[in-house]
Image (cartoon, helix red, strand yellow):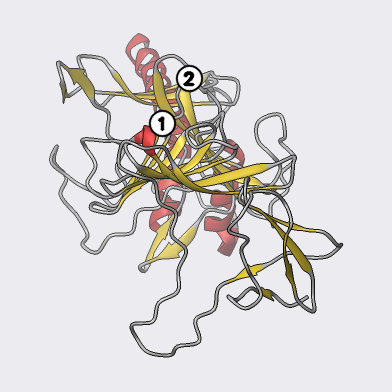
């Protein structure tokens, strides 16, 4: 249905009483204007649309709607839309420093969901029971649940109040991991507090495959320094509070801990550079540990063993490599050539056990020789 045009010729006001009865007739509908309530009523079924049209095409011929109060001390100047069940009101809120407000109610200042202040701060409230989203045009900051951050020039600040669940969740319709006791199935990344009452950040990645979380640093310049001042593309930095600033961790402080899903620590690296591993000790008593070390070196250097006889024909290196893989010294199928050199993933915790066993076996031989 087309918009209804009300012009001076179709709207004639009765300057007398103040009762219903002034009728506006045209081909589309009949409107009744109630002078007392200032209300247009439609008396037949159909749409009711009010349109203002200025047919002048000059640049100074504007068309607008002005809602005005008597002075700065007067009440609100607002518009309202309602269907009898849901009501939205927007306009100038005199009781809130003349801010422009959108409220999910019949009154400005009640259930506000959107505010623009006279100072240029824009605030968006996600829902009456949640925090606020703000945008400050002069700096570009955006706030959720807050409206200020003295340490931010350009960025996003989220204040989740006393909530302890996800403060950030990223989703994709391609994801369906099924771990719904922790996150919704289409969520692939979340940030939460590590401990509800003390903070810390817990980053979680979710996947229906094995790759759930990857930390990747992309830089431009290689750092080959091997000193305490060395840098790298990826850095893990442990810092301790000192007054209102920070300092290095204290003596024997754990800097990084790797835990399994049950919360048990498996690897620990402390501030002195010591590394600890929660391992199952293997003695290799059934093996000649010196010979095993000789095999490892010959595999990694692609040379004949120095001490171990080559009894495997032309595939001796392959046989040695498979043997070391079965012992868990070399990662299975990890041997390869890179930059013209043989390389392999080495299990250094097991290698340390093999070294330990080799020393004990040498000590046993020395003791037997001394006894003889």
Q: Position of residue 128 (x, y in %)?
A: 56, 32
* Total residue callouts: 2
Residue on which the image places disc 1? 159
Judge left or right: residue 151 versus residue 178: left
Residue on which the image places disc 2? 162
- Nearest the viewer among 47 and 275 is 47
- Nearest the viewer among 72 and 327 is 72
Residue sticking out furthest to the bottom: 57
SS class, disc 1: loop
Judge left or right: residue 43 versus residue 265: right
Quadrant where the C terminus is found in the figure: top left
Residue sticking out furthest to the front: 16
Quarter of the view holding residue 273: top left
- Nearest the viewer among 183 and 126 is 126
Q: Is residue 272 visible?
A: no
| Residue 286 drawn above or below residue 126 | above
Q: Position of residue 321 (x, y in %)?
A: 54, 51
SS class, disc 2: loop
Q: Residues within 10 Å of mark 1 (few under 14, many from 20)?
A: some
Q: Position of residue 41 (x, y in %)?
A: 73, 56
Quarter of the view holding residue 325: top right
Numbered badge on residue 106: none
Q: Position of residue 44 (x, y in %)?
A: 85, 62
- Nearest the viewer among 219 and 244 is 244
């Amino acid at each position: 249905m087309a918009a209804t045009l009300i012009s001076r010729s179709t709207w004639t006001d009765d300057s007398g009483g103040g009762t219903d009865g002034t009728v506006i007739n045209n081909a589309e509908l009949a409107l009744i204007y109630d002078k007392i309530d200032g209300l247009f009523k439609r008396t037949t079924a159909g749409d009711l649309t009010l349109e203002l049209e200025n047919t002048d095409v000059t640049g100074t011929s504007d068309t607008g709607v002005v809602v005005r109060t008597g002075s700065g001390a007067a009440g609100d100047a607002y518009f309202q839309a309602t269907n009898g069940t849901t009501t939205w009101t927007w306009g100038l809120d005199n009781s809130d420093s003349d801010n422009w407000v959108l409220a999910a109610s019949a009154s400005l200042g009640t259930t506000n969901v959107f505010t623009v202040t006279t100072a240029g701060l824009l605030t968006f409230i996600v829902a009456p029971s949640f925090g606020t989203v703000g945008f400050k045009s002069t700096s570009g900051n955006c706030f959720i649940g807050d409206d200020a951050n003295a340490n931010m020039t350009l960025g996003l600040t989220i204040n989740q109040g006393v909530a302890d669940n996800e403060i950030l969740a990223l989703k994709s319709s391609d994801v369906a991991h099924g771990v719904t006791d922790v996150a919704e199935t289409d969520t692939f990344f979340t940030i939460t507090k590590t401990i509800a009452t003390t903070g810390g950040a817990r980053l979680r990645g979710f996947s229906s495959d094995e790759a759930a979380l990857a930390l990747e640093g992309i830089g431009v310049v290689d750092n080959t320094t091997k000193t305490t001042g060395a840098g790298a593309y990826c850095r893990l930095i442990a810092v301790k509070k000192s007054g209102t600033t920070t300092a290095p961790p204290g003596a024997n402080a754990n800097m990084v801990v790797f835990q399994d899903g049950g919360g048990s620590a498996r690897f620990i690296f402390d501030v002195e550079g010591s590394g600890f591993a929660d391992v199952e000790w293997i003695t290799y008593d059934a093996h000649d540990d010196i010979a095993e070390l000789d095999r490892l070196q010959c595999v990694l250097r692609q040379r004949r063993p120095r001490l171990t006889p080559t009894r495997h024909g032309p595939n001796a290196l392959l046989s040695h490599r498979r043997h070391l893989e079965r012992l868990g010294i070399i990662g299975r199928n990890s041997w390869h050539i890179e930059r013209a050199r043989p390389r392999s993933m080495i299990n250094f915790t097991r290698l340390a056990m093999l070294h330990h066993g080799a020393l004990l076996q040498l000590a046993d031989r020395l003791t037997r020789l001394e006894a003889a």
